[in-house]
Image (cartoon, grey):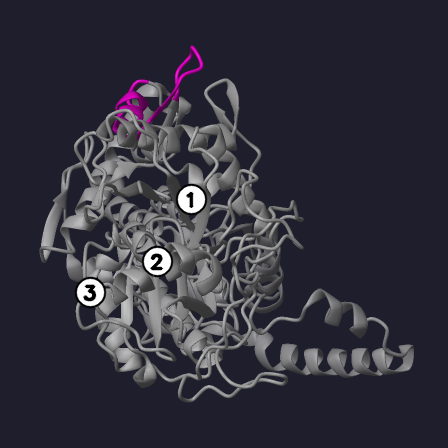
Amino acid sequence: MRILSVDLGTSNTVAVLSAHGRPPRVVEVDGSANMPSAVFATEDGTIMVGRDAERRARLDPTRFEPNPKRRIDEQTLLLGTDVIPVTEVLAAILRRVLDETTRQLGGELPDEVRLTHPAQWGQTRRNVLLSAARLAGMGGNLVLVPEPVAAAAHFASFPGKTLAPGQALAVYDLGAGTFDVAIVGATPNGGFTVVAEDGLPDLGGLDVDQALLVHVGREVSHKDPQRWQRVLRPESTPDRRTRRALQEDVKAAKEALSRHPQTEVPMPEPFEDVLVTRGELEALVRPSMLRSVELMARVVRSAGMTPDRLAGIYLVGGSSRLPLVGSLIAEKLGVVPGSLDQPETAVALGAQHVASDGISSRTQGVEGQLAAGTGAHPGVSGPYAPPQQVASIPGYQSGPGQSGGFPQSGYPNSGPQQVQQQPAPTNFPTYSLAGGDSGEKATASKKKPLVIGALAAVIVLIAAGLVYFLTSSSVTTYTADECKTPGAADDKGLTGCLRQLAGKIADTGDCKPGMGNGPAKPAEDLGVTSTCSAPGRAGTQVTYLQSDSAEKLKAYTDQLLAFAGGDRTEAKWVGNALEGQYSSAAGRNAAVLVFTVTDRPLAGFIYQVPAEGQSPTPGELADYFEKSIQPGE
């Protein structure tokens, strides 16, 4: 029996083969256990993959896609001038693995192919993966295995690590593109079931790379801001090559910091190489890693368990190599996690250790479907029995209608399942502005009786008038010439010009000199800075800056906006005898609003690293600025 298991990852693809009674072994492609999941479309229509694709990317980066798995929800990809279906791109990756496997088997095809997938993937995404496998020529005997089930099987394959029925393992999977966590329980008949799972689609190794890229940019961009912007936003082929090379060097530096306390990042001319330390990297990514640990704690609780009741916490995914991951888990959950093998290969190896019948009848939560029509359809009898009742996990309370054991999973029962097209998956969470009203609440408030609204308006007007009477005389205004260079700052770090920009926050915002130690801290001295707590939003700060160079401020704030990415909202503002423009951006990396003054080197910004349930849109940031931060008249 020749079994091939494939873990098609965001950055790398790993394949494992067991054949002729020999133990499972990693299939090396191009001499490496990890084949880059990268593709390059040549002008003649050929799709190159792996290291060949990465080499060709240096010639024409527009025809290159380094992480096609992240595009699985899109029907097509634009590579150069060619529009290529996503299934063909993924099929090219799987075909390269199959070709190498077939060569090593002396021309024979595998008897069975097991494809792993994130536990959160819905039917639509699983169908895309199956279609790509068929297109790659992987045959009719295709089986899908959720990644945490494969990881648990790999963990249990080690001596002394076997999971007894009713025991559960937490799988912490931090890959290049996403973070997934699952509680996997062992069933009495030797299989596994996904008890609870969740994930963060906006956290992975690529985000760590981006944070490190922004950090080194802060160190060097002041030398030539225009050149650095060309690196960030390449418009020519040489600039794209430069950016691609820099991204590879940044990724290599991140990996080196998992083994060494410091390393250097080679930089393109005219910039000097940057020395980075593990401490600096951990300070950059600590908020994001903390989100993952907090999510894991919630998933453990949702399974009715406590960390000390787990059989262990198993780290998989290449990015879990970050030493900070293990230390945060131990610090927050009181359990030292383990990684028993190379985390990049654990899932593909684990898929081999799930028994063949365990994939069908003994493993709840596994798609035991024979994808090319060989599987049984509903109503067709066969050798597959329903999964047996699972023994209770200590600490788990059965729900209504359950006699004990694991809670019902959102996955279909084990056994061959007919592949059916369903609507696009809705498993990605949505976020709302923390502390803000939802659109429904805002609409409901408009429906209150007119009398109450009028009375409230009168009260507001009276209060506003009183506040204006008490405070208007305390705001001193300065001319543009007086604000050209920073003056003396008070004990809060505010100059007179900055107080004019900060308005009421200068007195109510608990302001302190400097910019703190957050991810928005610049590498160079921009001038006088002060950071204040943002009203009405716990944990959010607003920073004010006065420099002797408006260009220097603009270069820095442009970097903040570029790092945030995503959509933007821009508008003008007026207040305290000042006028200017604000720009807000919110993407995967951060939410930022920058406000500048038209005729003087003054600026401010709100910077927020998105946390669970706290990812505002650019419009929401703009509303918050206008209501709470914008200086009044």
Residue 487 visible, this orientation: no
Point out the frontmost of discs 1 and 2: 2
Q: What element carries label 1?
A: helix
Of residues 429 and 356, which is closer to you in this image? Answer: 356
Q: In the rendered image, which residue does mark 3 sit on? A: 158
Disc assigned to residue 165: none
Of residues 539 and 77, which is closer to you in this image? Answer: 77
Of residues 615 and 305, which is closer to you in this image? Answer: 305
Q: What element carries label 2?
A: loop
Q: What residue type is labelled 2?
A: Val
Q: Residues within 10 Å of mark 2 (few under 14, many from 20)?
A: many
- Placement of the C terminus among the 4 image quadrants: bottom right
Residue 113 is left or right of residue 440, and the answer is left
Q: In the rendered image, which residue does mark 1 sit on? A: 562
- Placement of the N terminus among the 4 image quadrants: top left
- Estimate the x, y position of residue 43 in percent, counting from the top left: 42, 12
Earlier residue among tags 3 and 1 = 3
